[in-house]
Image (cartoon, grey):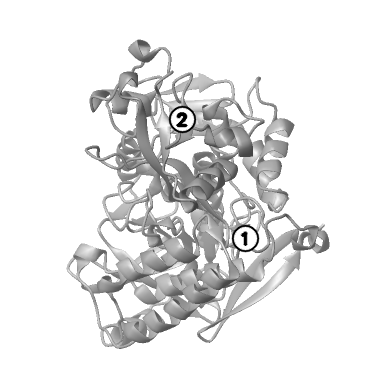
Amino acid sequence: MERFDVCIVGSGLAGMSGAYEAARAGASVCLMGKGGVGKASATSMSAGIFTHPTEGLREEELFKATIDIGRNVNDERLVRILVTNGRTVPEFLSEVGITYETKPSGITLRRQRLMFPGVELAQLMRKVLADLGVVLFERCVTESLILERKRCIGTLNFDKNGNAFPIASHSTILATGGFCAVFGDHDNPSGLVGDGIAMGLRAGALARDLEFVQFFPIGMKQEGFPPFVLFPPYANGARIVNEKGDDVLRKRVPEETDLTRAVLLQRDKVCQAIAFEEDRGRKCYLDLSNATGWDKIDMETLNSMYQLKTYGFSPSDGKVRIRPTAHHSMGGLVIDECCQTEVIGLYAAGEVVGGLHGANRRGGNALTEAVVFGRIAGRIAAERAMGRQGTPSTRLLDDELTMKETDTTHLSKMRKAIGEVCTKSLGIVRSREGLVNGLEWVNRLRQEARSTSEVSMEDGKKDIENILVVVEGALNSALLRQESRGSHFRRDFPVEDERWLGHVEVSMSESDLIYSFVSKKKLT
């Protein structure tokens, strides 16, 4: 059995940043990834935008914008850490050899080839971590956290061949990302299904804000083109129209006449505007017929537009069929300023954490969050791990290994059914009827899961029970929140209600989820 000071579960930017800091602090570190390091994460799919304070965007302006976009239910302690430490992001990226361009509101990764710049970031980080001596476990799935007297002492994992192996550690960091891949229509890697949130809940951690899921408004659904997300910036003159040619945003987002700004700053309203049109049977399109400067578009400046260009699209073709796609989950585990969860020895960073973004995320904050909180988690986890005496306990890990060999439930065939439930019940426009129907489906699927054994590594060997825990938590949290706020829109409660200024917290007792509303007024 292998032993480490720090075991990090999740190999996206938050996990890699944590591994970097922990290793530099002198800790022995391992990094667990479902795929190749960085490749099975949202980092690899990102547009490479980091928002942080600059001369053109002061710290207080960014703080206020993040709170405003989050509709005032953000954890302000975490927002302050984000904006204060965001200034260190350029220095960190330079340290690991990443090239970037400075912008008025932060930095953007340079694109060396026609690919998501996050892929290049992951490739460079992988080499840096290997040089620091971080042990990389790739194509491995962590199924559970192992506890001893309410302290996390390690993880139980499976390799690509389905063989179980435990890791003993003094500190464990969850950096497993969000849960948008549970939706039928999403732009995340397929492994981002909230398993870190479920593992944390089972271990005794708290979760919050699971009802808040951000959709990206411009997912390409054009016949003859591959599906992909068209990230900002967009060509001047671009707009979203319905099949009648009506400007969809003019009515619902009149304050933003520029599509790039609307998608960055009013993403929830843009998605809702499209959803309302689609509900009325009117398909929506990205209209580029009046776009200017098309001949000057290149990979560096307008990457998504350049992708369209390479596929043979031009403004003379007019419109591109689009539809919103699940993009980022704002809810997740509760942490303190040191990234510590309610469980001793268990830390969390990145999209697996809830509270930072509130009800809606500001564009550009996700990658900054991953670096800032990943580094904090790595540094503190290493310090506390190396301050403990002796080697990590292994007895319970051996016991758990024996049990798990005969007690696993994995169900690959249910992924499609779960995706349909989420899309119908947890989509952009919600209602009590839809949420209740979704919960009924979850209960049926859970019964089916208990009668099925395991799946192959081709499906990531996902623990479907973990997925169902997160989906149930999101559905019940959305049902409990009887208002519309940010990304959470209830057709039956269409306005924001100050009585719901706070967080829906989720805990687990035995196998049952427990819900409570924590007013933000009580926290201040």
For disc 2, the neighbor class at 10 Å (few under 14, some 14 to 19, many from 20) is: many
Camera-side residue of 267 and 192: 267
Identify the amino acid type marked 1: Arg
Could you tell me if residue 86 is visible in this image? Answer: no
The quadrant where residue 459 appears: bottom left
Report helix, strand or loop for mark 2: loop
| Mark 2 lies on residue | 232
Q: Is residue 439 above or below residue 484?
A: below
Residue at position x 35%, y 67% in the image: 142
Q: Mark 1–mark 2 contact, CB under 8 Å?
A: no
Identify the amino acid type marked 2: Pro
- Residue furthest toward the front? 244
Residue at position x 39%, y 47% in the image: 42
At which x and y percent is residue 151?
Answer: 53, 75
| Mark 1 lies on residue | 490
Q: Quadrant of the C terminus?
A: bottom right
